[in-house]
Amino acid sequence: MTKVLKVDAVEPDTGKIAIAAKAITEGGLVAFPTETVYGLGANALDPEAVAMIFKAKNRPADNPLIVHISKMTQLREVAEGVSPRMLNIAEKVWPGPLTFLFRKSDRLPQAVCGLTDKVAVRMPSHPVALALISAACVPIAAPSANLSTRPSPTSAAHVLADLDGKVDIVLDAGDTFFGVESTIIDATCRPFRLLRPGACTLEELQRLLGRVSVPMSVKKAESSAHAIAPGMKYRHYAPSKPLYMLGNKGFSHKLFAMKNVGIICSRELCRSYRGAGKNVIILGSEKNLYEIARNLFKSLRALDELDVEFGIIETFKEEGIGLAIMNRIKKASADMELPSTVR
Ligand code: AMP
Ligand code: MG
């Protein structure tokens, strides 16, 4: 049975946090909000609890987890060989939506890091996440609290839709702030390497870290998993209906009139086609990409609720948080553009 505990997002009830922290120290699973998305947490130092995360999510064992900490001294429990300069940088940017890869410590169970010798670490800024980690007094390993391949959860309802009965407690503090996951940087190489674009923008990172290399696989939003068949990639963040990206040829009135299509787009695009109807899901204003990011995963889930055969999603500029938005859109659509036959 999953217990849902509602907590205030800014000043969470200490009694409820203590119940959730006890579940963590006893080897259980707790889903909790961070400023990016909801995480599925377990004691990072307990191999059996970590194994339960993989089982609950149906996550492949070679896909490592991010370890969440609430104070700098916890970094030493999970990572080693962190240079004084890196410590300084981490201290400046944390708490926040930025994850660094360091060399893993011997103490950390190997399962947290998949097949690698590096650990991904972050100090989240959400008061509920910080309170939970502090009360549990252990680092918490937490991937996004969705079933593998599904869109990441930005509300407690999304967590329950995927994991009801598989997690002991869900701390419900309403919708998350950014709506896309943290940015991941490999801090063990020079120049620093971007592994996943996220809520902290590349432009902010470059100001902070100097040069940051962006591998081709990240630019193209390729999955780290190999293609399972020619022309077909492993899907991620995916609704269960086929999803196509709108190519640069634009929408047409014909598309908005079609009954078997769900359209996910900005308010402006919808207005210009007078397309408002039951099969249109509005992401927000194209002038505010943070609003688009916040509504993205919710909209991908909403597509599954529509009585349509497939979805089409607008594309956005790959600038600022737009880089993370387009990375998720490309993965959710397996990089497929709308075929010209249906335009
Ligand atoms: P999630 O929290 O569900 O977004 O998943 C955590 C992400 O962090 C995954 O996409 C992993 O690929 C990435 N990650 C975690 N640890 C490592 C690591 N040691 N090396 C590379 N990527 C990592
Ligand atoms: Mg995930």
Image: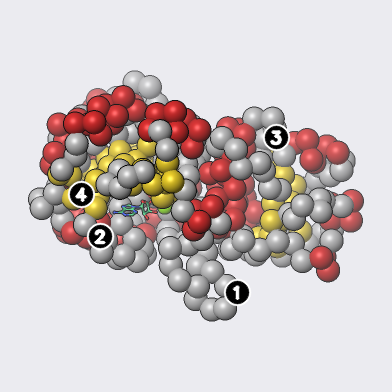
3 or 4: tag closer to the N-terminus: 4
Image quadrant where one finds the C terminus: bottom right
Q: Is residue 235 above or below residue 197?
A: below
- Label disc, if present, on residue 116 of the rendered structure: 2
C-alpha span from label 3 to label 2: 39 Å
- Residue in the picture at 47% in, 41% down: 198
Q: Position of residue 112 (x, y in %)?
A: 23, 55
- Label disc, if present, on residue 103 of the rendered structure: 4
C-alpha span from label 1 to label 3: 31 Å
4 or 2: tag closer to the N-terminus: 4
Closer to viewer: mark 3 or mark 2: 2
Are circles 4 and 2 on residues that touch, CB within 8 Å? Answer: no
For label 4, the SS is strand
Circle 4 residues within 10 Å: few <14, some 14–19, many ≥20: some
Q: Position of residue 329 (x, y in %)?
A: 60, 52
Residue 247 relative to residue 67: left or right: right
3 or 2: tag closer to the N-terminus: 2
Q: Residue under circle 3?
A: 286
Residue type at mark 1? Gly
For label 2, the SS is loop
C-alpha span from label 3 to label 4: 40 Å
